[in-house]
Amino acid sequence: MKTPIIELQHVTRTFQLKRNQVITAVNDVSLSVAEGEIVCLVGESGCGKTTTGKMIVDLLKPSQGHIFYKGQDIATLKGEARKQYRLGVQLVHQDPYASLNPMRTIYQTLAAPLQHHGLTQGEAATKNRVKELLEMVDLTPVNDFLDKFPHQLSGGQRQRVSIARSLTVNPSFIVADEAVSMVDVSIRISLLNTLLKLKEKMGLAVLFITHDLALAKYFAWEGRIGVMYLGRLIELSPARQLVEKPQHPYTRVLLSSIPEADPDVTRQKKQIELRSMDVPSLLHLPTGCSFHPRCPFWEGEQCEKVVPEMVSFSDGTSAACHPVQRERAAEMVQA
Amino acid sequence: METTTKTPGVPTLSIQNLTVSYQAKRGAVQAVRNITLDIQRGEALALIGESGSGKTTMGLSLVRLLPSNASISQGRLIYRRVDAGKPVREIDVLALKTDELRQYRWKECAMVFQAALNAFNPVLKISEQFADTSKAHGYIQGKALEERAFHLLKLVRLEPSRVWNGYAHELSGGMRQRVLIALSLLLEPQLIILDEPTTALDILTQRNIMNVLKDLRTQLDFSLIFISHDLSLAAELADRVATMYAGEIVELSDVYTTFKNPLHPYTIGLIHAVPTLAAHRDNVTSIPGSPPDLINMPTGCKFHPRCPLADERCKRDDPTLETVETVNGAEHKVACWHWKSARAKLTSER
């Protein structure tokens, strides 16, 4: 098997709140993303998806565990190798209103990284490259955009600039954290299509963080979706399989709760009831499987005491749930 | 200003030719343009559309909470209160004086805002918040208020004793939203406006709020307008859907018609632009272009620069919202020159 572009091995991240209060935002997460692959991380707020993204781009250090970039532990990278990693992995932020410098024109924003890293020689070459980048993100005619300031652009256009900026340094991996949640429904899809086109063209791998499962399915069509709950990755499966045949009870509850843009479907949808509506505090996580106090399929002692491991099945799905693993014991494959 | 009439079955609110604009440096922003709409008693109406389509401005103007740079240049708002055994009381909302307006707000028409945390006074306990509102409107106090509030908090599936003595910041986003919904019901208003009631909430919390709203509608008698860019919320909760674009209602019909047989190219595009769990990837397409500049509006139909069916007439003449004939005789209004062929053309191309 080829070396994954990014690999997380048992990564945990804790935050100290007060003297005696420690929360575990990300708990023992292992995940690898292959070259050119799309993985979506889905979960509710506070589940650790953003923290995971930040650790991958080295904005936060893991408290435990290791993250590998092309097989090398990013904590040990130095000098040129570290620079290659920092250039190779880029982040697209959620809020295009906050992530662009309001004092810089679009040209200045996009030219700065090119010049700083010596990726283009001379003014003319820089300008050509900037134009190329704008074209790649479908901001055309490009001459209309070069001298504009962010406030002259719509939210969707700004997010395109933000994507173009992440592409200036020719990355091989992009972390997009809720990158389309701030733009209008009518243009979300075209933004995602631009990302998909770039992925095809440049062989980019993308980690797309979102709370919208329908959007995740659309974007990760050929890729995978991972579901997080209270800091843990609880299911990781090929995108369409995850939506059509969810394994983990939490994923099933989520899917049954999502309203759909079709009155017949949504009003007849059978909702799975939770045992409790209360989301446990990260400060006092339940023992065993952290979903057990709310889980409709909870099966007693094992769920309450033993943290379920992530197990893969022969159809490519994997889930961290005792009852599911018992039921599908015959299909389990060794990792 | 009050007049009494005795017509039964009258709409709770009639919006007539409402036009609202904001004064900006570049010129007047025409946020709401000539909207006429009746809110029927007990119905839930969804206002959908992208940001900048005028949904929130329209909601704000119904309770006259527009910012100071906005002006209602034209139109009438007639609210009708119906109490059992009493004649219908008609209120001309735009003619209300300041003190009358304070009574109208919350008692007749309550608006629940998007950011639920900002809607509470941070130094008041939830109990004081209820008492405050009640006092301002000369409503019940003390034990009677507590009983009523507990009843409402139970209706929105909260444990009253848990939230009653707490502060807003101690509650989760979903709980706050539910407290606010309970508070909005306190004075038995006949119209409630919800602005993006589930945006910024988690999936399971959203589901909970939706179920609460559905419950409330079966138990209490009030009309509901909810403003949302989330089509699935409209599909779940609405009786009727009004699609807004560039400050106008471009399509109005019952919820099933909106989703199954939409006629306006914008509504059709919007529905296709939202990926659903069941949808195949190839069936999702986005609407080209971006929303119009509300200061320099396009000529003719405001959607024509983004519309695949636009022709010379669309560029020249602005279509008005017309009632179209439907198979089952249900109300269906659309503002498009090509409504007869739009659906067939736009669905076959895909």
Image (cartoon, rainbow, N blue to C red):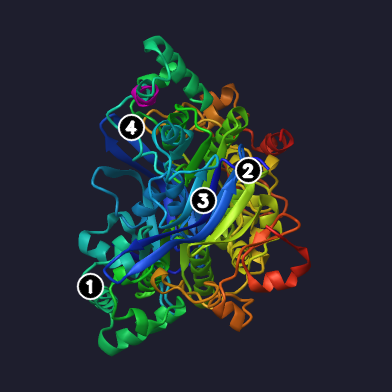
Q: The residue under label 4 is which amino acid type?
A: His
Q: CA distance from mark 3 to mark 2?
A: 20 Å
Disc 3 target residue: A210
Give yes or no for residue A256 being in the magenta stretch: no
Which quarter of the image is occupied by the C terminus of chain B? top right
Rendered residue at 40%/13% (across/down): A121
Chain letter for the residue marked with disc 2 in the picture: B
Work out whether residue A114 or residue B338 is closer to the camera in this orientation and state it. Answer: A114
- Position in image of residue A83 (x %, y %): 41, 32
Q: What's drawn in magenta, residue-wise?
A: A108-114
B74 w.r.t. A242: above or below: above
Disc 2 target residue: B272
B90 w.r.t. A152: above or below: below
Dot 3 surroundings within 10 Å: few (below 14), some, or many (20 or more)?
Answer: many
Chain letter for the residue marked with disc 4 in the picture: A
- Position in image of residue B345 (x %, y %): 71, 34
Say which mark, if any, is on residue A151.
4
Lower sequence index among marks 3 and 4 = 4
Give the total of numbered labels: 4
Disc 1 target residue: B124
